[in-house]
Image (cartoon, helix red, strand yellow):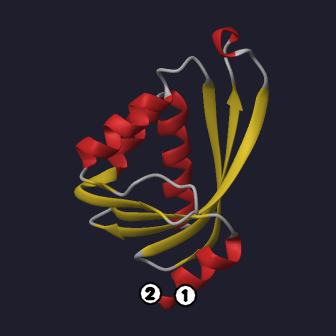
Amino acid sequence: MTSDGAAFVAAWDAAFNAAPEAAAELFAEDARYEDHRPLGWEPLHGRTAIREWFRTLSTGGATIRARSRVLEETPARIAIAQVFQIVAGEADGGGDGEVTVWVVLRLAGGLIAELRIFGDQEAALAAFRAA
């Protein structure tokens, strides 16, 4: 049986893997995107800003694929582990790698109202459980 959270993150992966900016459609118009890692990105506010950020991920010549799995969920929140597989283009010297992040999503009206990225699973689960 697939949980609602698993179905949601499968939709995320499918959208992101088709074109990163397509995943922005899963965000509420006034969504917040916060990266809590020491070398993370600046916070973003609003679907348009998030879409533009995601669009930059597909303009550098690298291929990026997302694979997500649910760690814990409630009807309004999902904690996930996301693995991004990255293959650099020839112009960037080629090569491949993986980046794993842990994410807490807060949902409202079936869309992401808030996305918080963490550098380790323990921090993400602590944030998830504290909310």
Kindly identify the amino acid type of the residue bearing the numbered disc 2.
Answer: Ala
Kindly identify the amino acid type of the residue bearing the numbered disc 1.
Answer: Arg
Rendering coords of residue 126 (x, y %): 59, 84
Q: Quadrant of residue 81?
A: bottom right
Residue nearer the viewer, 107 or 100? 100
Residue nearer the viewer, 44 or 30? 44
* Residue 76 horizontal side relative to residue 95, left or right: left
Q: Residue at x 49, y 80 (%)?
A: 74
Rendering coords of residue 85 (x, y %): 70, 37
Q: CA distance from mark 1 to mark 2?
A: 6 Å
* Residue 39 horizontal side relative to residue 44, left or right: right
- SS state under label 1: helix
The residue carrying mark 2 is 131
Q: Residue at x 63, y 77 (%)?
A: 123
In the depicted structure, whether residue 62 falls above or below residue 98 = above
Query: As drawn, which residue projects farthest toward the front?
Result: 39
* Residue 96 horizontal side relative to residue 76, left or right: right
* Residue 123 horizontal side relative to residue 44, left or right: right
Are the residues tagged 1 and 2 within 8 Å (C-beta)?
yes
- SS state under label 2: loop
Q: Residue at x 46, y 34 (%)?
A: 20
In the depicted structure, whether residue 123 falls above or below residue 68 = below
Q: Residue at x 36, y 68 (%)?
A: 107
Rendering coords of residue 11 (x, y %): 49, 47
Query: As drawn, which residue projects farthest toward the top?
Result: 91
Q: In which quadrant is the N terminus drawn? A: bottom right
Rendering coords of residue 80 (x, y %): 60, 64
The residue carrying mark 1 is 129
